Image (tube, helix red, strand yellow):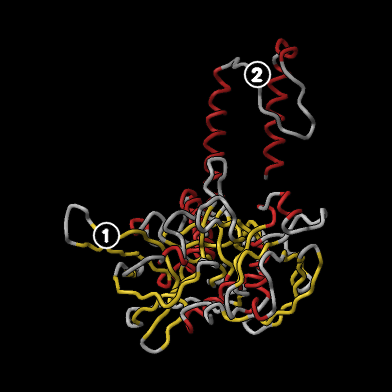
Amino acid sequence: MLNTTAFSEREKYMDEYNQNPATRDLEPSVPENKPQPSLRRPQKRGGFLPGILGVVVGALLVWFIMQGGSSTKETPLVDVSKQQAGIQTERLSYDMNNDITDIVGKVADSVVGITNLQTVHDPWSPVETTRETGSGSGVIYKKQGDKAYIVTNHHVVEGAQELEITFDDGSKTAGKTVGSDMWTDLAVIEIDAKPVKTVIGFGDSDALKRGETVIAIGNPLGLGFSGSVTVGVVSGKDRSIPIDFDENGTVDWFADVLQTDAAINPGNSGGALINLAGQLIGINSMKISEATVEGIGLAIPINLATPIIDQLEKNGKVNRPTMGVTLLDLRSIPAQQQRDMLKLPATITDGVVVNEVMSKSAAEIADVMQYDVIVEMDGEKIEDMVSLRKHLYNAKNVGDTMQMKVYREGKLLEIEMVLKDGNSF
């Protein structure tokens, strides 16, 4: 049909063209087989009626094709567009639910708010009052009998005389600190199991990969923003962050943490960092908040936290081995005293000086002396007190035998020591 129509239009065009030679120089050539739209200026009124008829016929032809002779109910084109748009919206919504909202919905009840209450003395009144001195977050990880257990940060519960636990639905209950550990910044709280709806499962923080999606849940800036959810990725693993516990300008410890760009703010401390399986893979602990830094949140890996949690729950403390000495970094000793008093070789610049040996300690039994300079433990170089603590607390247990190398009066000695519990003397 289309070829026939095109041919007829061309014949009519050529007839008019041949009848009016004056217009030949104004018209473009017409290809033999391809119809072209007319560029002629209107010359006669008689050409208007065929144009109108052509429009009417074309419109009827389009209408007939759209109807298709079908007896089914017609669907306007605009409705089809809306239907397609609806399908796309549903797909996007499903993907988002599958990735984030469903996961959060399953674990949200296991994340709680923790309010630290302490007695405050008012100098203008003899009456003592109990007030909120801080708040944070926690994660319910165990329910056993009539008790349930929450893991949080040491600094969230530090100094608390009372603890108030707030659930995701706003209900509250009292909590009691079972145990707390400054070095790992972890604590365990005990609560009544009756109001507990959900207990979170532990994941494997060692299996995490950089770029893997993680979700942080907690209460930033207090309970006014309770249950806040932020999403990010694992930015880095095995980060060591210097910690100054007494804020005297000297590093006391290096915390081993995960780095994430999920937003972590004050009040998120102790909250959950979870993977897309809804498993706990980290305890949100801190953030780097310098003016030039953005998006560096830190969490304690759950694989490092698990043995500490177990000890706190069972014993109320972490039984760490100790030598029974007080120590000084060699770097803090003036060079002249290193030569004259310690009689160290000039090549020895790193190590730890024994300042005092406690009575009945493991060090005293092993004949460690004041001013011994420890330079090696079990074949590992000891540069300062932080590296000594890391080896002692992470690599050794109570009752283990440890080999040490020390300089005494300029001579290198080897000492064998059986480590004791820090609470045994």
Q: Disc 2 designates what residue? A: 40
Alpha carbon separation for disc pair 2 and 1? 97 Å
Name the one closer to the observer, 107 or 187. 187
In the image, taking residue 38 as reference, residue 309 lies left or right, namely left
Residue 69 visible in the current orientation: no
Q: x, y (%) of residue 27?
A: 72, 17
Mark 2 burial class by Cα count in 10 Å: few <14, some 14-19, many 20+: few
- Position of residue 57 measured from the top left corner of the image (x, y, whole percent): 55, 39
Question: To which residue does mark 1 refer?
Answer: 120
Expressed as whole percent of the image width and height from the top left, the position of residue 281 reads 57, 69
Please, is residue 184 above or below residue 341 in the view? below
Above or below for 236 versus 103? above
Q: Position of residue 355 (x, y in %)?
A: 62, 64
Residue drawn at (36%, 78%), measured in percent from left and top? 191
Indicate the secondary structure of the residue bearing disc 1.
strand
Residue in the image at 58% along x and 53% along y: 250
Q: Identify the image quadrant of the N terminus.
A: top right
Q: How many marks?
A: 2
Q: Residue at x 62, y 74 (%)?
A: 204
